[in-house]
Amino acid sequence: MGRVFALRNVRIYFSKLGRMKFVSHLDLTRFMARLIKKSKIPVWYTEGFNRHIYMNFAVPLSLGFESTCEIMDIRIVDENFTNSQCLEQLNSVAAEDIKFFAVNDPVLPTKEIGYADFILSFEELKAETASKLSAFLQSDSILCEKTGKKGKVKQIDLIPKIKSFLLEDKTLNLTLVAGSEDNLNPSLVMDTFFSQTETEPIFYSVTRTAILDKKGNKFK
Amino acid sequence: MDTQQFEKLLLQVQKPGRYSGGESGSIIKDKEKVDVRFAFCFPDTYEIGMSHLGMKILYSLFNSREDIWCERVFAPWTDFEAVMRENNIPLFALESRDAIKDFDFIGFTLQYEMAYTNVLNMLDLAGLPLKSADRTSLSPLVVAGGPCVCNPEPIADFIDLFFLGEGEEVDLEIIDLYKEHKKKGSTKEEFLRAAAKIEGVYVPSLYDIEYNEDNTIKSVTPKNGAPAVISKRIIKDMDKCYYPDNFVVPYIEIVHDRVVQEVFRGCIRGCRFCQAGFIYRPVREKSSDTVNRQARALCENTGYDEISLSSLSTSDYREIEPLLNKLLGWTEKSYVSLALPSLRIDNFSDELLDKIKHIRKSGLTFAPEAGTQRLRDVINKNVTEEEILNTCRTAFEGGYTAVKLYFMLGLPTETDEDLKGIADLGQKIVNEFYSMPNKPKGKSVSVSISVSTFVPKPFTPFQFEPQITKEEIHRRQEYLKSCITTRKISLSYHDSATSSLEGVFARGDRRLGAVIELAYKNGCTFDSWTECFDDEKWKKAFEDAGVSPEFYANRLRDYSEINPWDHLDYGVTKKFLIKENETAHNEKTTPNCREKCSACGAACYGEGVCFEKR
């Protein structure tokens, strides 16, 4: 401390696949801190009593979901340290199911995130269930109960939060509101569908494929 | 195993990270290119097993050999066990997800007696017969090590061979011997006979036990050339001893989620209740250079930002000051924190004191173990009330407001007066706080007293002592509770039933094998977990087996009685233990190993503190 650093934010893009889907968001933050430490990237540490690496994850990913589009911001304290060096050093210590594919200068702050794309792959989807699901997603409103962080249950309408959907064969593409202000988890959509239409739950896997800004463009 | 199907099942259970594998530092080999596959089993949850240093050392050591692939296995929690049984998934190793019944070795580490039913459950989940005698082929061999092996008799029916003492050398000797015998096409019997000739290896099936009418042991007779006495193994030179330069770093949070750096083995203190203090003798230290180098490599390779120094009593490390200086030379710069156990800092230099001021300290804890000086002398715990009060005062002045004290209840010769002494000591610490003119303003003091139940253990001077009964444990706990009159003191204690059971198995013999098996079949697993422990099932198991738990736990044993573990040699002689027992009853202390050698027998290894220059 006492020195003045030219801090530089960098935005790191990575995938979280395979076995990594069993790693919860909290565990991921600890994992990333260790990985960054091993990578020897000149990162900025917070200045509190309990100093730790500054990391900002764009939108936490639910346990059990895979993703090809995760975003994390860190701060670099060395002016001469380039984004490509950063990417190289991260990949030199990356695990099997975490791959870093880009490091860029951030364009928008994370509060500008508006939507996220998900692909839900069903183990099997009968034609009857598919048409029920399609009709369900085109309803005028889908009222359901959502339990908030503090355990408060409130009634919400899912329809305004579903920007678009595409049901093809055994996959459902969903674009849902995402971000710190409003967020919709695809499991809530499916749980509501199963319970409100009295459909026997079927297994599906979820992959997040894009994080979008409020205009619906790729968040950068 | 079908990955997709498996991962779908994982999503149904709590903490799937316990079973998913693929952690950083975990080792994947080509199974076609190794000669020996070793399933290292920890009979408790992932979070506990992954915190265990011994497993980390042996995992890395075995895998450092090209011909061995060692993988990790933990006891699945009840939710995942149900899923496994429902879907016919046999117990598998985390790295390869292959069923462990096809491995060459299934090795358990036995850290506490209450894990025995989990050992049986894991064998059953693997699809293997529980009893050694019913597993007739050479592999998988079911082997076990760890502190409980100093009296392995209760679990002897289920294990093919035990490793006594430290495993770094003897485990590899056995693996090499196995390779030879596998090539030769030996039978299990042939292999075990040859194995029994290696020092530190105990093959229980090669010993016949005869009993007297009063149920005590009449004789232990070796057969087929097995040695009459089996000696534990130790590593002589700790600086040359293998130590991993990387750990498997879990994704989920485990109990000790940091770099654990071993400093020395053994303990000079000789507290008479403490099994570890005797079975790991003699004290053998690593040099501060070795400790520093190993800790640094571990930090760099794991990415951990915290180191804890591990030993039975780190403040007794002779090179503690040079070590801290070396460590602090790089840890601060790389944002690595050092967790220091409550060290005796009285003789540190001002410079070092100034440095460690910045280190985050864990809470202020003491282990007086007994409430009166008389009883502390009986147990040879050389802590005085004055020392405790002085340290508390210094700590309070430094801003601490919470103190944690550890005690034991049911120690030999304990009276109600000793119990009252526990409450009194707590009260004196509270008074000390309020008597300070410069006490932290607006803050209250809190003293937490944690009372465990004394369990007499083999190879301690108290191995002859009766454990108090469950009812008496309960009465004494209630009495102690009634002695505490202020809310500044909080009291917690162990469940009496678990402690009693631990007392039975710690000093049990082979007839308890039937009890463990019955209890397991009644549905007992995870007995050290209060949510799983069911005393009624255990009671029924004892009744059905016709075995009295009181015989093992609550009986005063004559010095001349043959104990179930008397044919095992941990260096410390029975003669010494008898002498120490007598000294305890005379309420006299024994000096520590560095003050004066008490000729315990551990000098037989020719190393360590016994040969330090004094």
Image: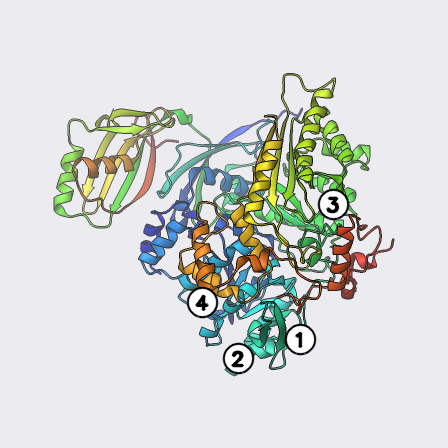
Question: Splitting the image into 4 quarters, where does residue B571 fall?
Answer: bottom right
Residue at left offset 58%, top offset 59%:
B552
Which subunit holds the residue at mark 4? Answer: B
Mark 1 = which residue? B228
Marks 2/4: CA–CA distance: 17 Å
Mark 3 = which residue? B381
Which subunit holds the residue at mark 3? Answer: B
Q: Could you say where residue A29 lies in the image, as x and y percent from the top left?
A: 48, 38
Label 2 SS: helix
Q: Quarter of the image containing the C terminus of chain A? A: top left
Q: Which amino acid, by three-letter code, is at mark 4? A: Leu
Lower sequence index among marks 4 and 3: 4
Disc 3: CA contacts within 10 A as few (<14), some (14-19) or many (>=20)? many
Mark 2 = which residue? B189
Q: Which amino acid, by three-letter code, is at mark 1? A: Ala
Lower sequence index among marks 3 and 1: 1
Label 4 SS: loop
Lower sequence index among marks 2 and 4: 4
Q: Which amino acid, by three-letter code, is at mark 2? A: Glu
Label 3 SS: loop
Above or below for B166 versus B423: below
Discs 3 and 1 lie in a common subunit:
yes
Q: Which amino acid, by three-letter code, is at mark 3? A: Lys
Left or right of A104, for residue A43: right
Circle 2 or circle 1, nearest the eye: 1
Discs 4 and 1 lie in a common subunit:
yes
Marks 2/3: CA–CA distance: 46 Å
Disc 4: CA contacts within 10 A as few (<14), some (14-19) or many (>=20)? many
Discs 2 and 4 lie in a common subunit:
yes
